[in-house]
Image (tube, helix red, strand yellow):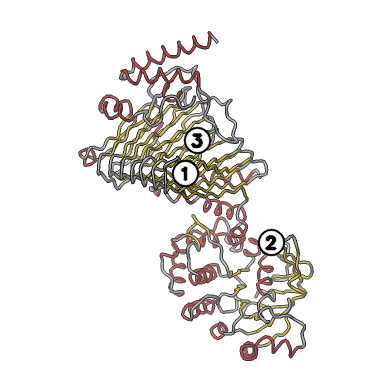
Amino acid sequence: MTEAVQNYETLKTDVASAAKAHNEPQWLVDHRVAAIDDLVDLGFPNMQRFQYSDWTLTPTDEPLEFKDSDKSLADSVPFADDRIQFVQAGQTTVAVNLPDDLKQQGVILTDLFTALHDHAELVEKYLFREIKLGEDRLTSYHAAYLNSGLFLYVPKGVVIDKPIEAYLIQDSTRKQPMVSHVLIVADNDSKFSYIQHMATVGDVANAASAAVEMVAKPNSEVHFSSLDELGENTTSYLKRRANIGDNATVDWAIGLMNDGKTVGDFDSELIGKSSKADSKVIAVTSGEQREGINNRVTNHGKRSTGFILQRGVLLKKSELVFNGIGDIIHGASGANAEQENRVLMMSNEAHGDANPILLIDENDVLAGHAASVGQVDQEQMYYLMSRGIARPTAQRMVIRGFLSAVIGAVPLPEVRQQMIDILERKLEDGQQLE
Amino acid sequence: MATLEIKDLHVEVEDEEKQTKREILTGVNLSMKTGEIHAIMGPNGTGKSTLSQTIMGQPAYHVTKGDILLNGESIIKMPVDERARKGLFLGMQYPAEIQGVTNAEFLRAAMNARRPQDNQISVMAFLKELDKNLELLDMSQEMTERYLNEGFSGGEKKRNEILQLLMIKPSFALLDEIDSGLDIDALKVVSKGVNSLRGDDFGSLIITHYQRLLNYIVPDVVHVMMGGRIVKTGDADLAQKLEDEGYAGLRDELGLDVNLVDED
């Protein structure tokens, strides 16, 4: 025990000196150090019917280090001048493209650590305010070992018609965890779409701790979509949380196409009156992959509305657990919480679960849920096959339809097509060994 | 010339919920070839749809006796997609809706499914064919970019079945109550589509309750089904006679012991 505490004291000293050498503000250094204290005490977040406590998600034996990555890791990113884009490979920001008119309106899109200096007050006001100290071991590790990320700020009343694209590339050409933090602030009455594509280059086994922390202020509207495509040798923890203010709306369309072990913990905090969240997640698991997702919408505000939709497809010997958590807090009168969780089993050896969890502490509310664990719809299969389409192709078409709630919500046709291509590849691969 | 022969066909249907089996077809005999249009009429619950679904291979229907031959080859053990590629098409009463797959993409997949891998249809040839058929059926381009049957009205679904028929050009089209839920204009359009395929390389088996459709698609042969088998075969005049006299009249004339579902 003494030895363990001493180790943690060493970790604190190491992290503090690395952060200081990185010219970080004192408050962030202190936050990192406090987070290490939490690491000692707290456990992994609870995930019903999913066991992952033996995963290497908090590799404290790997020090906090700031190292550049080769920019060529981002060569596959379709960079274009007329788009709003942010590209980061490892910890190296490869490119940022923000049109001048948006800059003039006060929009900020930059590397998180640059923002700590250039927009110190704003970042201090919002960073780690939603994803706080004292929650669990995974968020604590994340705060202590943060090593990359971006800051997006959209000022009051600014409406952006093109999607803001972020490409976050995990550098697994070397041993180093990806601890990435995306901070998004949508100020009052702003409106935009943000689309994030995470991928891995390299085969080195690494942990990834990737968070999105979002504040959607009153009357704002944020459409978030993601294509998560981390590699087979990456063990990942994805944390996404939004604080949603009065009359604000946040939509999540999350396409989980990771090839490795993944635990996802998604929160929509409906703080404001008449706030809305629509949290959609699709996932495809294959091989011996294991994936557990908590998708939680918490209704605090009166007349707040939360929807959860989760759809998953399981191939081979994979495991996928969807927990949909609808939590209505006392006082949230007139709240609405609906959810639907469905998984398709494409193999007898796969293990899938779809658990609706409703926690309701208020009388005047609407709540409902649907869940299923099943096979491909036989009527749809019959229809497609009656036109001569062979069974494997028909199956892939039906599955794509099953997952279309998220695919259809991706605002860029190119990313939508990438998602479809990845899906097809995974399904074809999974079907061959049936 | 292609042939379709149904020989002493007995079919059971499984009710999965009740775990029971019920015999619906009790010995159907029918033989047709391309160049011919056959109509099957009959009261509700007599097995007309069962016949078409069994020919196509719907897995809930089990052949307990008899055979179905396409060009002399038994198809009852073939999977549905293979039957389709060999030339069968079923225009369904209740087409499935499939999100995420556009109508156009589906049509191309269906056309390519019957072509060899090294001779897939080109985009240009596909679009040309598609435009021609859309015009024939008075359908908008926009219909092809929508997801397959999703949110289509009853009439749009039926038109879409005929669009598929025109694109795929099977040897035999089984059309199951393609007229149900259609107003007179839509009925004319659907009939125009089917008639445009008439010729030596196309045959159709049209299932209908009502004679009305047969004013627009005039059949060469009319069969009447009752109690799970064909009880009378004639020419187009037979349909007119049924329209005038009803099924009960024919039943009594033939001295059959069959319950008509809609009869109290």
When the figure is inspected, residue B134 is found, relative to residue A90, above or below; the finding is below
Distance in Å between CA atoms under marks 3 and 2 = 39 Å
Q: Which residue is drawn at 62% across and 68% down?
A: B87
Q: Closer to the observer: label 1 or label 2?
A: 1
Is residue B1 toward the left or the right of residue A282 in the image?
Answer: right
When the figure is inspected, residue B64 is found, relative to residue A198, above or below; the finding is below
Residue furthest toward the left? Answer: A104
Which residue has dot 1 on it?
A362
Could you tell me the amino acid type at mark 1? Glu
- Please tell me whether mark 1 sits on a helix, a strand or a loop: loop
The answer to whether residue A429 of the structure is visible from this angle is: no
The answer to whether residue A393 of the structure is visible from this angle is: yes
Distance in Å between CA atoms under marks 1 and 2 = 48 Å
- Please tell me whether mark 3 sits on a helix, a strand or a loop: strand
Could you tell me the amino acid type at mark 2? Pro
Q: Does the CB distance between marks 3 and 2 fall below 8 Å?
A: no
Quadrant of the snapshot with the N terminus of chain A: top right
Q: Which residue is drawn at 25% across and 44% down?
A: A157
Which residue has dot 3 on it?
A264
- Please tell me whether mark 2 sits on a helix, a strand or a loop: loop
Asked whether the residues under marks 3 and 2 belong to the same chain, the reply is: no
Could you tell me the amino acid type at mark 3? Gly
Give percent across and percent down for residue A68: 37, 23
Q: Closer to the observer: label 1 or label 3?
A: 1
Q: Does the CB distance between marks 1 and 2 fall below 8 Å?
A: no
Distance in Å between CA atoms under marks 1 and 3 = 28 Å
Specify the label residue B59 is tagged with. 2
Depth check, front residue: A244 or B236: A244
Q: Residue at x 39, y 35 (%)?
A: A75
- Parent chain of label 1: A
* Label 3: how many Cα within 10 Å (few below 14, some 14–19, many 20+): many
